[in-house]
Amino acid sequence: MIMANIVDQDQQWLLNCLNATLDTNQDIRSFAEASLHQASLQPGFGAALSKVAVNKELPLGLRQISFHHISVILKQFIKKHWQEDDEFFDHPIVSSDEKVVIRQLLLFSLDDPHGKICTAVGMAVASIAHYDWPEEWPELLPFLLKLIGDLANMNGVRGGLRCLALLSDDLDDTVVPKLVPILFPCLHTIVSSPQVYDKPLRAKALSVVHSCTSILGAMSGVYKEETSDLMITMLKSWIDQFSIILQPSVRSEDPDDWSIRMEVLKCLNQFVQNFPSHTEPEFSVIVTPLWQTFISSLKVYEASSVRGTDDPYLGNYDSDGAEKGLECFVIQLFEFLLTIVGSSKLVKVIARNAKELVYYAIAFLQMTQQQVHTWSLDANQYVAEEDDITYSCRVSGTLLLEELISSCGEEGIEAVVEAAKKRFNESQQDKATGSTGWWRIREATIYALASVSEQLLEAQDSGSTAFSIGDLIEQILTEDIGTGIHEYPFLHARAFSAVSKFSSVISQGILEQFLYAAIMAISLDIPPPVKVGACRTLSQLLPEANKGVLEPHIMGLFSSLTDLLKQASDETLHLVLETLQAAVKAGHEAAASIEPIISPIILNMWAENVSDPFISIDAVEVLEAIKNSPGCIHPLVSRILPSIGPILDKPQQQHDGLVAGSLDLLSMLLKNAPIDIMKAVYDVCFDSVIQIILQSDDHSEMQNATECLAAFVSGAKQDVLAWGGDPGSAMKSLLDASSRLLDPVLESSGSLFVGGYILQLILHLPSQMAPYIPDLVTAIVRRMQSCQIAGLNSSLLLIFARLVHMSAPNVEQFIDLLVTLPANGHENSLAYVMSEWTKQQGEIQGPYQIKVMTTALALLLSTRHAELAKIYVQGHLVKTTAGITTRSKAKVTPDQWTVMPLPAKILALLADVLIEIQEQVLADNEEDSDWEEIQERDQEYNQHFLYSTSTSSYSRPTAEHLDAMAKVFNTDQDENYEDDLSRADPLNEINLANFIMDFFVKFSRSDRTLFDQLSQSLTQAQHNALQTVLNS
């Protein structure tokens, strides 16, 4: 054993340097830091640093002050100088002899009595083990196992367990199977001996069990028999021990008890997820203790967090950095219950008691006193935690309810509804008896129902349930409408939010009551959370509101929302803008009268928040809603242009974000604008937009300016050349812009939207672009070869696909052109383009993009051009390794692919499209079959799909089915601005399924020999998809 308890000269110098780095004098600090850096480059520094770190003879105060700095420096030293092939390595490398000294010094200091120092030593050991273990440090694990088995050295047990827990991140499938049979009995002894080992130690032992079981679970996919053999002999004894730990009632103010239970739940989670068939026979042992833990933890949670002032351990951490708190424990409890409910083998255990489970789960959803306090003071925090999936007990509880319904179906729905009714009735009784907390359980009940609203509504629409969710919701929500808003703001906020979720099953009269109540709430001096809920209700109800009911209140609503805008900030500002947008759309006809009032306010808000992408986008969307209202576009443009023109004319003088934001605002004005508006915008801004593209280095400015140019070309078409008086000069400006955007030296982000811009040029200015196609192709290839953004490459590949279509019926000529053009590292541009195209085809998104690129591939293959057969492209992924793909394995064995002839690859890609369409058909049919009722309009719609091609020259029912799916496929996409730009393209009219099916039929008939030859490379699934077409 190597010890260094005497403070020698080197150690004293290091201590002096470390203390000097804390000096208030900047010069002294800088000199000390420079001295340490120079010392770190000398042989022996690591050993000297380690000696100081583990020297127990130093005064404790000095050790703790110094050790924080030492641990950081030592960690950096190991990262930089330990292994040459590491990405962070910096010369010099630590010698082998010095490594031995450092390893031994640290290893024999794992029993340090001071927790933080022991943890830091363990971290240093784990850092070294990442590089040296097991090959260069085989004695590490035997030493740790001996350490945790030494009852005479509890500090050593603690240090060994901490180190094992830190090492667990680097365990893999080569180590764990050998380690578990030796390690688990040691850990079991610790966990099962509460009279010897304290709860923190036992919890740490369980954390190591969890890590090893996780690795075994990951291995079980490949080594199922081996991992099962390992676990089956130990599983019963562990579950028996878990039962003992979970059996007693949860105690208040005992975070060590919560921690050990939490580790038990984590281990059980792994057992159930990875070894369900072995866990199921033993699971009955755990059910009663688990239920006892669940029920008793609710009592503690309600007393401590719901009714109490706060969880006293919230935000506290132990010496290892693990959070200690009641809520963390409850969240882990919900996570395990979630795993049980999601297990087909174990869910039946829960299903028998589903109503009780939901009943108690709803109580866990009550707002805590801490949440009431925080959300009352900060409405932004309330909105943020409502909108985002945060780490909380409430969110975990709702996830359990969702999974229960998914797994148990009608029984799960019945459980939720019955439990909600029971909790609502209890809240009524509590209210009648004067209990001050009655509103909490009612708010939690509404929150629970709203969290599973989609599943409840689907069940009711299907007719598979006997209850009326609408009646239940109306009963609960109308009980308190209009009363007690100041006393119970969160209850009213929740009721408003729930109305927006269940609006489809609430009667029109009740909806109008809530609509009116929400409009009034916006105008009253009431707590902010209520206004938040009112905004949510208005955003949902306004689009479908009865115009007659809304009309008397619309001007007052605009006034209230405008006032609310002045008070809002951050998260609430987003919500108010969203509500205002809905109000503008709902008050369509009234918008013209309020445009002079609202537009300036929104424009000022946009200008103040232009650097905040979320708020500025919301503001632009409100302005767009105003623009689209009758009689508003001309005054709005007249209001905006005089301000935007000077900004774009002198972009260098503007503050960050203003130019890019102005260009975004300009694109909105141009979208679907009448020609006189486009001309007015052109006169003020066109030249400035061109100059920004040519001169700016700001990527956001370049992207937004590119979108503006695309909108000009798409909307004005040939007029964009004539408006400036010199068509040739205007065309040159457009080409100069494309040249800058396609510059291979330009960072990819600046070029991001060039694909959409060029697409507009070739679609709307085809004759003017024709002479430049060869130069354009060369520039696109160069841009693609330097590109680092997949989305940009995809958009440029779309240009090639569109050019293929434009060259039809002489596609061979376009192929010949590509063959004549060079591409760095490839035979020619055709070889490069097709190599990239075939790699990315499966990742293409958007109905237009898929349609254009898929049909272009078919056109290319139809030519049977000789150059296509000369090209070999990436084929199928080759699986080269089994087991877990660790970081080291991924480095030495990257993915490997076969190569295949281009024509065969194209045929396979086209077959994949058929498979995708067919799978979508089956998925939609299965979804429909889940419910007994289908709305009449859907029946008519689908019937139209199924028989729309009945007049085809081929009688192919399956093909008609695929054709039907193609239409569903095309309409199942969200509209966006790029869709607007491409909507005018006649290729949108192509029926994708019919096109591909006709292609396969004609291609196979015209050259059966070639077709059969190419088909040999297809998978069985691809063959089946083709046969669906060819044999029909």
Image: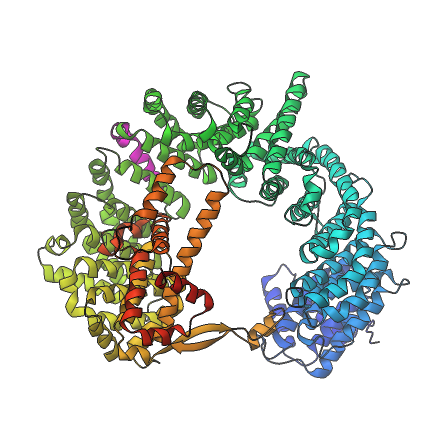
Left or right: 832 as drawn, with respect to 531: left
Q: Is residue 51 magenta?
A: no
Which residue is outermost to the left?
725
- Residue 744 place in picture, x, y as percent: 31, 71
The answer, for residue 612, to whether it is visible in the render is: no
Which region shows up in magenta? 590-606
- Residue 275 place in picture, x, y as percent: 70, 58
Residue at the image position 31 percent from the left and 58 percent from the top: 851
The answer, for residue 448, to whether it is visible in the render is: yes
Seen in the picture, residue 288 relative to 917 is either above or below; the reply is above
Quarter of the image with the N terminus is bottom right
Q: Which SS type dominates the magenta stretch?
A: helix
Residue at the image position 43 percent from the left and 53 percent from the top: 920
Quarter of the image with the C terminus is bottom left
Left or right: 312 as drawn, with respect to 552: right
Seen in the picture, residue 48 relative to 493 is either above or below; the reply is below
Res 587 → quadrant: top left
Seen in the picture, residue 521 relative to 845 is either above or below; the reply is above
